[in-house]
Amino acid sequence: MHKDFQSFNVYLYWNGFFALGIVSVGWIYQLEAFLQTKKTSVLLLSAIVCLVIVAIVSHLLPTRIYYNVPRLINGIPGFLLFYITCHLSQRILQKSVHAAIHYIGTMSLVVYLFHGYFTRFSSIILAKSPGQILPLGYLLTLSILGIGGPLLLNHFVLKQNRILSYVTGGK
């Protein structure tokens, strides 16, 4: 598979995963209510089972041969592993530590999901600008806009939209 098409395919895959999160937001509330009724030992065992499923599928279906199949299969147990781990951290860690981890994780998810739009737009503008741009200036501009753009988007848009806020880890 051509390298550019493969990276474009990965980009579309993750945006599809994000769209699936928006669609499934109603089920997440039910999953959260279900997990709150379970004991910590059951959640820990469930997390281990999800991790084993992900490892077995990744081992049996390597991505170099079956490109999207292991990703699609591992999407559900991977999401459950992440969600169960968040619930375990709420039970085990102190509230202040958990709140700090939650904030950092929410912001990193927002940056991860939206940095591509901002860096690509910035690089197009920089490429069209007259004159030669130093590589350090190019790197700094893309880094600042790639991180700052999604954080501003989160502050002004995502926090106002309940579904998008929840999907990116907000309450």
Image: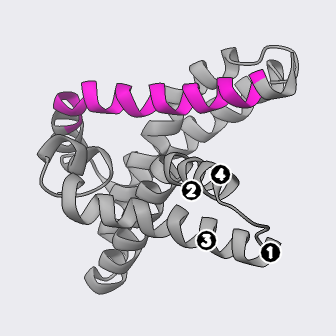
Q: Earlier in the sequence, mark 3 or mark 4?
A: 4
State the CA–CA distance, disc 2 to disc 4: 10 Å
**Residue 105 visible in this rendered orientation of the protein:** no
**Residue 52 visible in this rendered orientation of the protein:** yes
Question: Which disc is residue 141 wearing?
Answer: 3
Cβ–Cβ under 8 Å for marks 3 and 4: no
Mark 3 closeness class: few <14, some 14–19, many ≥20 residues within 10 Å: some
Image: 59 above or below 99? above
Q: Earlier in the sequence, mark 4 or mark 1?
A: 4
Give the camera-side residue of 160 and 86: 160
Residue that label 4 marks: 128
Query: Which residue is at 18% across, 58% downward?
Result: 159
Label 1's element?
A: loop
The residue range painted magenta reads: 5-28
Observer-side mark, 1 or 3, equals: 1
Query: Which residue is at 29% across, 44% downward?
Result: 167
State the CA–CA distance, disc 1 to disc 3: 11 Å
Cβ–Cβ under 8 Å for marks 2 and 3: yes
Query: Which residue is at 59% across, 47% downward?
Result: 120
State the CA–CA distance, disc 2 to disc 1: 15 Å
Mark 4 closeness class: few <14, some 14–19, many ≥20 residues within 10 Å: few
Label 3's element?
A: helix
- Name the residue type under label 4: Lys
Give the camera-side residue of 47 and 20: 20
Label 2's element?
A: helix
- Name the residue type under label 1: Leu
